[in-house]
Amino acid sequence: MNKQVIALALGLMFGAAQAGEVEVLHWWTAGGEAKAAQGLKASLQAKGHSWKDFAVAGGGGDSAMTVLKSRVVSGNAPAAAQIKGPSIQEWAREGLLANMDAVAKAENWDGVLPKVVSDVMKYQGQYVAAPVNVHRVNWLWANAEVLKKAGVKPPSSWDEFFTAAEALKKAGVIPLAHGGQNWQDFTTFESVALGVGGADFYKKALVQLDAAAINSATMDKVLETFRRVKAYTDKNAPGRDWNLATAMVIKGEAGMQLMGDWAKGEFIAAGKAPGKDFVCVAAPGTAKAFTFNVDSFALFKLKKADAQAAQRDFASAVMSPAFQELFNLNKGSIPVRTDLKMDKFDDCARLSNQDFLATAKAGSLVPSIAHGMAVPSAAEGAIKDVVSQFWNNDTMTVAQAKQRIAAAAKTQ
Ligand code: BGC
């Protein structure tokens, strides 16, 4: 056999030389998100494959998950889908996900990923998903000039938050930009729970779903504080998309937003500079804690060899250092690989990186419930519904809300 034939044979065996198509389900359609997704497409195309876009708009991904389910039921799964946290295990248990160990071993994923992340990417010890980033959810974003005009500093406690919100209201701006969709309501709720109750309470009540913690006096305080926050949002909040809420802060129509750091992607895409035009601080009372949200792609089992090869190249591209840097600069998150330098990243990302490591050591690194990192999907959905009902219905008492959260936590 001559060299060319050997190379071709090896190529066919490992699929390296075959071009294939990778269909990718995601919900990255806002400004910063779309820029980040574009980078992923380019990395895949650089490996000679084609990208089939399967974007389903809708922040938080609820619509994307509904569409994914119907596609899988009809036997037509995409090659990769943005699926996170315990849901990865749920899909793997159905026998639908492909084993990525060949790529993961060759590229030493175990050595470069935090264990808290690699555990979630594996099913029965084998990689079935590839992670992209770490988003911090417990952030508060603010328009620097608007705060200055109102004479307030970015709040570091809930008391300071309410003082700042009052001052902003007097200054004639909407204190808090909010989008009334249930994942956004819960994004606010979990930051309030972390700030008011602390990381241990958060873990007991919202991760372990411990009935005593859910029924505690601390939960009363959390719910009361959460309700007080609503008074500082505007009447057009219901149904508003998160990126439109961020745009209100960017334009100075609103002072602050409680949102994960995909919001930073919007500020950056609008040409705004951190520390100058906008500020990022941990959500009130949560500076020593970190709610993590890891975006990852689950890889579905495929039949054709060329498609499988392209899928492996996609997984490899997702984990490559160059891609992780570029993607996260646009997305607002930080790389999930622990071996990358943060030189090119801004102060918000550096703070996130520093706090991710510090809170992991201190035990106050907690998974985001709003973003599917902690609770099986059925219970997560039911709890989110109750929290949104409480937010929207002023006649629901704190006692009723607690009782309903406890009941929702048992949903299977
Ligand atoms: C995802 C982010 C996304 C955000 C808003 C979160 O659940 O993890 O990647 O930017 O939703 O759509």
Image (tube, rainbow, N blue to C red):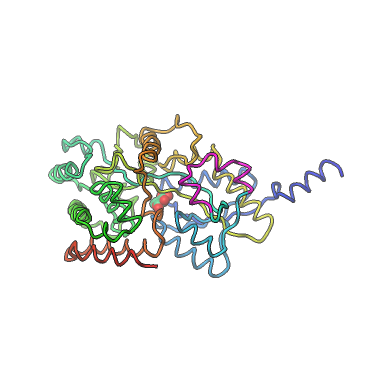
> In the current view of this chain or complex, which residue is farthest to the top?
343
Please name whichever residue, 142 or 295, is drawn nearer the observer in this view of the structure. Answer: 295
> In the current view of this chain or complex, which residue is farthest to the bottom?
74
The quadrant of the rendering that contains the C terminus is bottom left
Q: Report whether residue 397 is seen.
A: yes
- Residue 100: x and y in percent read 60, 51
Verify whether residue 325 appears in magenta. Answer: no
Q: Is residue 255 above or below residue 400?
A: above
- Residue 208: x and y in percent read 35, 56
At 20% across and 45% down in the image, what residue appears?
158
Verify whether residue 120 appears in magenta. Answer: yes
Left or right position of 246 against 217:
right
The quadrant of the rendering that contains the N terminus is top right
The quadrant holding residue 301 is: bottom right
> In the current view of this chain or complex, which residue is farthest to the front?
212
Q: Is residue 405 above or below residue 108?
A: below
Magenta stretch: give its range: 102-122
Please name whichever residue, 214 or 37, is drawn nearer the observer in this view of the structure. Answer: 214
- Residue 353: x and y in percent read 40, 36
Left or right position of 327 against 390:
right
> In the current view of this chain or complex, which residue is farthest to the right?
1
Q: Report whether residue 251 is seen.
A: no
How many badges with numbers are in the image?
0
At 49% across and 54% down in the image, what residue appears?
82
Q: Main secondary structure of the magenta part?
A: helix
- Residue 172: x and y in percent read 15, 45
Please name whichever residue, 131 or 182, is drawn nearer the observer in this view of the structure. Answer: 131
